[in-house]
Amino acid sequence: MARAKLRDVPDLSDLARPGAEIAVRVTPGARQAAVTREGGLVRIAVTVPPADGAANAAVLRLLAQAMGVAPSCLEIRRGHRGRDKVISYSG
């Protein structure tokens, strides 16, 4: 399955500071993948259903693309099974 590329990804490169924790609200199973920023909260919609961690992996890929970093630099600290997550950037 090919991964969809986002066209209008916001520039979140200012969040790419080592040790930064990013508050994220996730919408799994969305019609279209999207990344938006509302104040200090990042909203991410992924088309993948929340099964077997696939949605979490998609969230990390989209956030990494918006931040301009590798997905391996991101880790979910809190909220593995919920919609509200805290993701840390290790740099």
Image (cartoon, helix red, strand yellow):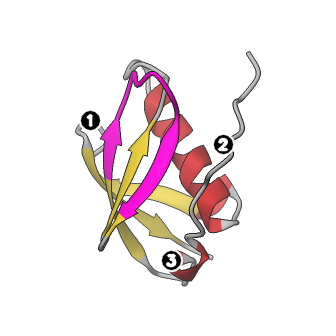
Name the residue nearer the viewer: 48 or 90.
48
Badge 1 density bin: few <14, some 14–19, many ≥20, Cα 10 Å? few
Q: Please determine whether, in this image, residue 78 is positioned above or below residue 52.
A: below
The disc, 3 or 2, on the residue closer to the chain's N-terminal end is: 2
Magenta residues span: 25-37
- Residue tagged 2: 6
Q: Which amino acid does label 3 sit on?
A: Leu
Residue plotted at (53% across, 37% down) = 57
Q: Is mark 3 on a helix, strand or loop?
A: helix
Quadrant position of residue 83: top left
Q: Which amino acid does label 2 sit on?
A: Leu
Report, in whole angstroms, how far the alpha carbon at label 3 lies from the one at label 1. 23 Å
The disc, 3 or 1, on the residue closer to the chain's N-terminal end is: 3
| Residue 86 location (% of width, % of height) | 32, 60
Residue plotted at (48% across, 22% down) = 48
- Residue tagged 3: 15
Residue plotted at (66% across, 42% down) = 6
Q: What element carries label 1?
A: loop
Q: What element carries label 2?
A: loop
- Residue tagged 1: 81
Question: Disc 3 or disc 2, which is closer to the eye?
Answer: 2
Q: Which residue lies furthest to the right in this view?
A: 2
Tell whether 27 sits left or right of 73: left
| Residue 56 location (% of width, % of height) | 45, 37
Tell whether 58 sits left or right of 37: right
The disc, 1 or 2, on the residue closer to the chain's N-terminal end is: 2
Q: Is residue 19 magenta?
A: no
| Residue 19 location (% of width, % of height) | 47, 81
| Residue 91 location (% of width, % of height) | 63, 76
Q: Does the magenta stretch include residue 33?
A: yes
